């Protein structure tokens, strides 16, 4: 149960971090906070950035599976 919680929590947090790298502003703590964030480093349609995120996700999963 703890592993499932950790995996879900980590997945949500890393998704929010990935969203913050784009140009589109969003409210990560809505409805608790109303501020918007966006770092504007890459576009959400940037194929290289999306491929990098997929590769990082696969590597994280492979590392977890080898434990």
Image (cartoon, rainbow, N blue to C red):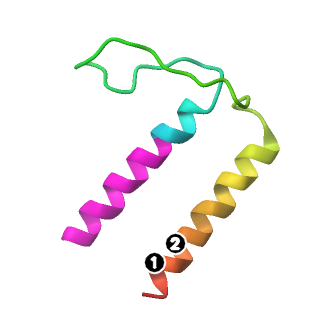
2 over 38 or under it: above or below: below
Q: Which residues are magenta?
A: 1-15
Say if 64 sits above or below 31 in the image.
Answer: below
- Where is residue 46 drawn, in percent x and y? 78, 36
Task: Give the main secondary structure, helix, strand or loop, of the magenta stretch.
Answer: helix
**Which residue is most to the top?**
34
Report how many numbered discs are placed on residues in the image. 2
The reply to whether discs 2 and 1 touch (Cβ–Cβ < 8 Å) is yes
Residue 65 lies, in percent from the top left, at: 47, 83
Q: Secondary structure at mark 2?
A: helix
Question: Residue at the location (54% across, 17% down)?
Answer: 25
Q: Which residue is mark 2?
A: 61
Which element type, helix, strand or loop, lies under badge 1? helix
**Which residue does the numbered mark 1 point to in the structure image?**
64
- Based on the picture, tell me whether residue 2 belongs to the magenta stretch: yes
Q: Which mark is residue 54?
A: none
């Amino acid at each position: 149960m703890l592993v499932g919680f950790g995996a879900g929590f980590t997945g949500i947090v890393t998704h929010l971090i990935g969203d913050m790298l784009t140009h589109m502003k969003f409210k990560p703590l809505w409805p608790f906070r109303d501020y918007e964030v966006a770092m504007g480093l890459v576009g959400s349609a940037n194929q290289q950035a999306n491929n990098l995120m997929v590769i990082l996700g696969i590597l994280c999963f492979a590392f977890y599976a080898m434990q």
